[in-house]
Image (spheres, grey):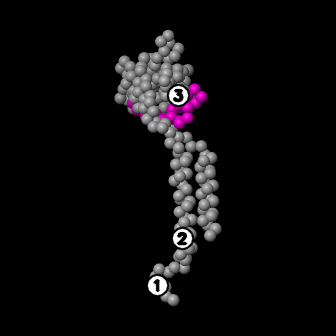
Amino acid sequence: MRQPKGILTTGLLIGIAAFAVPVQASILWSWNYSGAGIAASGTFTTLDSPDAQGGYLIASITGARNGQTITALQPTGTWIPGNEPYAVDNLVFAGPGPQLTKAGFGFALADGTYSNPFYADFLPTPGYLEFYSMPDSDSSTELAVAFSASLVSAPEPATLALLLLFLPLCYIPGVLMRAKSQHGMRNLDIRKPHRK
C-alpha cells in the first residue's frame, strides 16, 4: 500500500516543479507592409508579456518580401548588414499609435538581402520606413512603407496545460494498484478455475 502514496507524492513533486520552471507562452501576430515596389507580409511570434513600454519581443518570423522567403530574424541588439550602427530591437506594439520603434525589426531573405522596417519618429512627419540592404552589390534603399501588425492568437498557459496532462498519469497507477489489492488479483490464476 506504500506504492500508491509514493507515486502520488512523486507526481505532486513533479507538478510543483513544473510550476517552478518558467515556461514562456507566445503570441502569434500577422504583419505586412507595402510601399513603392515593396510588398512584405508574414507572421511572427512574440513573448506573451510586453516590456515596461508595452512592446512585445519578436522571437521568430516567417513570411516573404517581394516573393523572397524570409530565412532568419536579425538578432536583437545587432544591425542588418549595411545598416551599421542602427541595431534592431525586434519590438512590436499592439497600438494605438506606432507599432514599431525607431530601431524596428530586421530579417534576412533567401536571396542574400536584408530588410529593417522601423518607425521614423525623428522625421518632420513621422512614418514607417524600410531600410533594404543588398550586401552583394554594396547598395541599399530607404523607402516609405505602410506597416500593420495584428494579433492572431492569445498566449496559452503552457505550464498549467502540462500539469493537467500529467496529474492523471500520477493517479491511474494508484487506482490500478488499489483495485488489484482489493480484488485479490495478486493470487488470481486465470488458467485454473477456483474450487472450494
Residue under numbered circle 3: 91
Residue, x 53% and y 31% (percent of image)? Answer: 56
Residue, x 50% and y 10% (percent of image)? Answer: 124
Instruction: State the image coordinates of residue 189 (x, y, percent, origin top left).
Output: 50, 80
Numbered circle sitting on residue 2: none
- Residue type at tag 2: Ala
Mark 2 nearby-residue class (10 Å; few <14, some 14–19, many ≥20):
few
Q: Is residue 40 above or below residue 45?
A: above
Residue 100 visible (yes or no) = yes
Instruction: State the image coordinates of residue 100 (x, y, percent, origin top left).
Output: 50, 24
* Residue 63 on the magenta span: yes
Magenta-highlighted stretch: main secondary structure?
strand
Task: Depth check: give the residue in front, 78 or 134.
Answer: 78
Mark 3 nearby-residue class (10 Å; few <14, some 14–19, many ≥20):
many
Q: Which residues are magenta?
A: 43-64
Task: Depth check: give the residue in front, 190 or 139.
Answer: 190
Q: Looking at the image, tell me whether mark 1 or mark 2 is earlier in sequence order.
A: 2
Residue under numbered circle 2: 179
Mark 1 nearby-residue class (10 Å; few <14, some 14–19, many ≥20):
few
Q: Looking at the image, tell me whether mark 3 or mark 1 is earlier in sequence order.
A: 3
Mark 1 to mark 2 CA distance (whole Å) = 21 Å
Q: The residue tagged with tag 2: helix, strand or loop?
A: helix
Mark 2 to mark 3 CA distance (whole Å) = 56 Å
Residue under numbered circle 1: 193
Q: How many marks?
A: 3
Q: The residue tagged with tag 3: helix, strand or loop?
A: strand
Residue 109 visible (yes or no) = no
Residue, x 55% and y 46% (percent of image)? Answer: 159
